Every structure is written in structure tokens, then in C-alpha cells.
Image: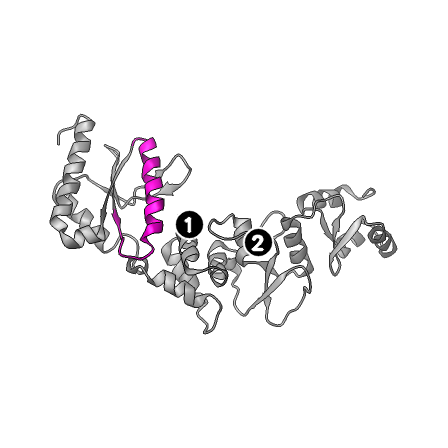
């Protein structure tokens, strides 16, 4: 298309080639001209009063922009928002999943409509391209209806690694506890399977281990020490002695999803070794069977590490 103002041309480049009747009218493209452009195939109708310029590709993002322009209250959510956030462990979604209020029916084609009576302002993120999408915690919750338990467990682990902490996810769950809400039962099953998820970080068994090590002269250990891995991921071991690049982690393998933890933790440990750190792990089962013996092993491993650094054990 030619004859558009520089302002509208810039808008089109930033919004995946999607434009509204109102924006075209403001730019001087009057109704009879818009009709001719549609007839000529230069403007492709997407929703009522919303078009895509034919020279711009028909992409998933352009569909999401069009949905948001068709209704200024609509929010992309679920698997569609997960795709935009680049969540792992979700299947690819090629159709915008649009969250709207119960009393609205603004979109009739090309999207999957879902209705809600609860969407707080902090649950909505507006991208520079104009797409309104649900926040990572709300997206995580809304994905529960479309995934089985095993995949949702893996998604939960990934979201905790990249976007949220346990209290944030529990807060999201509590805000959406209306009876019959799709996915709520799955969310509660997954979030309640491992008891330590329900405690504040740094409490319980982890503190018992760190306190026992402190009494044996290990450290001083820094709790939740931030460690940036070569992959860019930021981890926080339960306890760390930065002077010798040694860390200890308490694993909760009694949760039935522990296999997902194990896969993730092995990768983390390998990447920690790439930057010279040694991470030693002890499980809740080992601690339950012989707490003192497990602590003895950790003390020996810390002393060996000190010797490697030429320090007195």
C-alpha cells in the first residue's frame, strides 16, 4: 500500500501489519477507499473493522494483535500466551486463545474464546507490539486445563525456574479458587503433591541441614546464594561456601514428580561444574534414614573441597 503517512507506516511495521478502521480513517483513508483496497486484496479483513495489510505476513503474532484491536479488553491467554512467553513443555498453539468477560462476545471467528469473571490488572502484560497477554503466573494457571498432569508438572518446574516463585504461584491459585474453574483440580493436585512447596523458601529440612553443618564448622554457608550458570539461568543453592565454590542442595525425592527435578538438577550441576563449582546433594530419604550419617558425608566432602583449594580442612 502507498500513500500512508509515516506515522501509520511505522505503526504497521510495529504491529505486524494490522490496522483498524479508525486508524485508517484518521490517516485520511476514507470508507470508499478502504472498500476498494479490500476488493483489490490489499487490505485483508481479520475481524470487524480490523485488517491486515496484504504485504505483511499472516503470522500468529498478527492474529493476536488483530484480536486485541478488535476488543480493547481482550487478553491472550492459555497455550497461546504460553507460546508468546516461550514456555517449555506445552504443545504449539496456532490459534489465539482470547480471554474476555462473561458479558462480551466481541470476536466470532479465528480465535478460541474463553470467559472469565476474574482478571486483575496485574495479570495483564502489554507488549510493545500491542498484544495484551496474561502474566506468566496467570498463563501457567490457564494452561492447566489443556495439559495432562505429567506435562503440567514439567511446566510448573519450568515456570518456577524462569518466571515465578512458589508463593507467587500459590497466590495465583488462591485468587482463582472458584468452584468448577477449568484446570483448578489439576493445579491443586500438582501444587500439593510436594509438601515443601507449601512452606516458605528456606524453611524446614533445608534449615536443619544448614544448621547441622554450621555446628560442625562448615562454611560459613550463604543461604540461597545466587549463582549464574553459563546457560544464563540463575540458581540459588540451599547453602554455599563461595570461598571454595562448594554448594549443598537438599532434594525432595519423595514427591512422585522427582524424576523431573532429577533431570533438571543434573543439568544444573553439569553447568555449575563448567564455572568451577561443586554441588553436592542429599535427599530427604537419606536424611530420614540417617541424618547424622548424611551430615558426616557432607562435612567430608566440604573438607575435601577445601584441600583442593589448598586450605586447611
The disc placed on residue 158 is 1
Q: Helix or strand or loop: what does disc 1 sit on?
A: helix
In the rendered image, the vertical position of residue 300 relative to residue 134, given as above or below: above
Residue 252 falls left or right of residue 80: left
Residue 75, image quadrant: bottom right
| Quadrant that contains the C terminus | top left
Q: Could you tell me if residue 165 is visible in this image?
A: yes
Q: Position of residue 234 (x, y in %)?
A: 38, 41
Q: Residue at x 15, y 40 (%)?
A: 299
Q: Residues within 10 Å of mark 2 (few under 14, many from 20)?
A: some
Tell me which label, 2 or 1, sits earlier in the chain: 2
Q: Secondary structure at mark 2?
A: loop
Q: Is residue 73 visible?
A: no
Q: Residue at x 39, y 34 (%)?
A: 230
Q: Which circle marks residue 198 in the picture?
A: none
Q: Position of residue 32 (x, y in %)?
A: 88, 55
Picture residue at 23% right of the left edge, 56% below the top: 204
Pinpoint residue 258: horizontal percent, then vertical percent.
31, 53
Residue shown at the point (81%, 48%) measured from the top left: 42
Check if residue 19 falls in the magenta segment: no
Whether 91 is drawn above or below 107: the answer is: above
Hey, which quadrant is residue 50 in on the image?
bottom right
Left or right, 124 with respect to 68, comes to left
Distance, label 2 to label 1, CA atoms, is 18 Å
Asked whether the residues under the numbered discs 2 and 1 touch, taking CB atoms below 8 Å apart as contact, a structural biologist would say no
Q: Indicate which disc residue 93 carries.
A: 2
Q: Which residues lie in the magenta part?
A: 250-276
Residue closest to the eye, 22 or 177: 177
Q: Is residue 271 magenta?
A: yes
Amino acid at each position: 500500500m502507498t500513500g500512508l503517512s509515516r506515522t501509520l507506516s511505522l505503526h504497521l511495521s510495529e504491529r505486524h501489519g494490522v490496522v483498524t478502521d479508525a486508524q485508517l480513517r484518521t490517516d485520511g483513508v476514507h470508507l470508499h477507499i478502504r472498500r476498494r483496497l479490500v476488493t483489490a486484496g490489499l487490505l485483508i479483513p481479520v475481524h470487524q473493522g480490523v485488517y491486515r495489510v496484504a504485504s505483511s505476513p499472516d503470522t500468529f503474532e498478527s492474529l493476536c494483535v488483530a484480536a486485541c484491536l478488535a476488543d480493547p479488553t481482550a487478553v491472550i491467554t492459555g497455550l497461546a500466551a504460553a507460546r508468546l512467553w516461550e514456555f517449555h513443555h506445552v504443545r504449539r498453539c496456532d490459534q489465539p486463545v482470547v480471554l474476555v468477560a462473561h458479558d462480551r462476545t466481541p470476536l466470532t471467528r479465528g480465535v478460541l474464546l474463553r470467559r472469565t469473571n476474574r482478571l486483575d490488572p496485574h495479570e495483564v502484560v502489554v507488549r510493545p507490539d500491542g498484544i495484551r497477554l496474561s502474566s506468566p503466573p496467570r498463563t501457567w494457571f490457564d494452561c492447566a486445563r489443556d495439559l495432562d498432569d505429567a506435562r503440567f508438572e514439567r511446566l510448573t518446574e519450568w515456570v518456577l525456574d524462569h518466571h515465578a516463585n512458589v508463593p507467587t504461584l500459590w497466590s495465583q491459585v488462591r485468587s482463582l479458587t472458584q468452584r468448577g474453574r477449568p484446570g483448578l483440580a489439576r493445579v491443586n493436585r500438582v501444587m500439593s503433591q510436594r509438601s515443601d512447596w507449601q512452606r516458605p523458601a528456606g524453611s524446614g529440612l533445608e534449615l536443619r541441614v544448614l544448621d547441622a553443618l554450621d555446628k560442625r564448622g562448615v562454611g560459613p554457608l550463604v543461604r540461597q546464594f545466587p549463582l549464574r550458570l553459563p546457560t544464563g539461568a540463575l540458581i540459588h543453592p540451599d547453602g554455599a561456601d563461595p570461598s571454595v565454590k562448594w554448594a549443598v542442595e537438599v532434594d525432595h525425592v519423595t514427591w512422585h514428580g522427582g524424576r523431573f527435578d532429577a533431570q533438571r538438577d543434573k543439568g544444573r550441576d553439569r553447568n555449575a561444574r563448567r564455572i568451577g563449582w561443586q554441588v553436592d546433594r542429599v535427599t530427604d530419604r537419606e536424611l530420614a534414614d540417617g541424618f547424622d550419617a548424611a551430615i558426616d558425608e557432607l562435612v567430608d566432602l566440604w573438607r575435601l573441597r577445601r584441600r583442593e583449594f589448598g586450605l586447611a580442612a
